[in-house]
Image: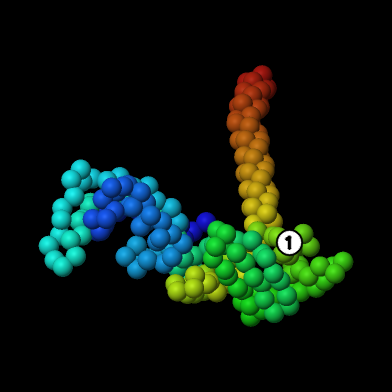
Amino acid sequence: MEGLSVADANLVMYLHPSKSRNVSQSILRELGSLLFKFNETFDGVLLAYDVNILDKQAKILSGVHPYFGLRLKANLLLFSPKPDMLLEGKVVKLSQESIHVIVLGFSSAIITAENIRGEFKYRTKDKEELFASKSHKRHVIKVGTMIRFLVKSFDEEILHIIGSLISAHTGSIRWLDRHLEEDSEFDRSSMKSRDREWLGDKTVDEGATPMSYDNHIKMSKKRRITE
């Protein structure tokens, strides 16, 4: 899935002297408060982190509040969806007007009817609402389906995504992956068939030369006998 990235960051964290007794715990608490929130500095939503404290001795800052600063080396996992990126999520609600999706368990997405390609037709089966493909009867989207969709926009404040199923390479992940495997197998089979045909043609061509040569020798012998 696109939109996920790992970044190395050099950070400086300022702590109050009252937290000096347990610096490591205070740092983890401060970083934990940034989780699952969009951060402009990181240009993404912080999902996880691994941090190392570089300073063995903290420096007291001058000013009214005597905070001390610590240099940190952090490894960050960020979620930063951009337009036209492919995301994956689970369908949690579906109606004729829209498909509602949860991405990575925390970010919500909606795909409205105008952003669903005409191939999909809304219908109900055994009182279950779903979108079924008119071209491929096994390509179905319903509650619980994992889908792949394109990002149209991302609201950084509420972590809400507007998605699209217009592109042909979007839809049910299970169907898309299986269809891709079938296409790959078909391509491999076609290639093998072409190779066999090429080898067969080559064998015939190579075999034609000795036969022609033998015929030429026989004809030459007949000509000498006649003479």
Q: Is residue 9 above or below residue 106?
A: above
Viewer-nearest residue: 196 or 146: 146
Which residue appears at 55% of the width and 74% of the height? 162
Local packing at callout 1 (Cα closer than 10 Å; few below 14, some 14-19, many 20+) is some
Number of residue marks: 1
Q: Is residue 52 above or below residue 43?
A: above
Quadrant housing residue 78: bottom left
What residue sits right under mark 1 in the picture? 139
Q: Is residue 66 left or right of residue 112?
A: left
Which residue appears at 66% of the width and 19% of the height? 225
Specify the amino acid type for callout 1: His
Most extreme residue toward the left is: 62
Quadrant housing residue 114: bottom right
Most extreme residue toward the right is: 126
Counting from the top left corner in percent of width and height, residue 129 is at 78, 70
Q: Is residue 184 left or right of residue 73?
A: right
Mark 1 lies on a secondary structure that is loop
Which residue appears at 80% of the width and 73% of the height? 123
Q: Is residue 178 visible?
A: yes
* Quadrant in which the C terminus is drawn: top right
Counting from the top left corner in percent of width and height, residue 133 is at 74, 67
Q: Is residue 49 above or below residue 154?
A: above
Q: Is residue 178 left or right of residue 102?
A: right
Counting from the top left corner in percent of width and height, residue 43 is at 36, 65
Which residue appears at 64% of the width and 53% of the height? 177
Counting from the top left corner in percent of width and height, residue 13 is at 26, 57
Q: Is residue 120 visible?
A: no
Viewer-nearest residue: 34 or 17: 17
- What sort of colour scheme is used for the picture? rainbow
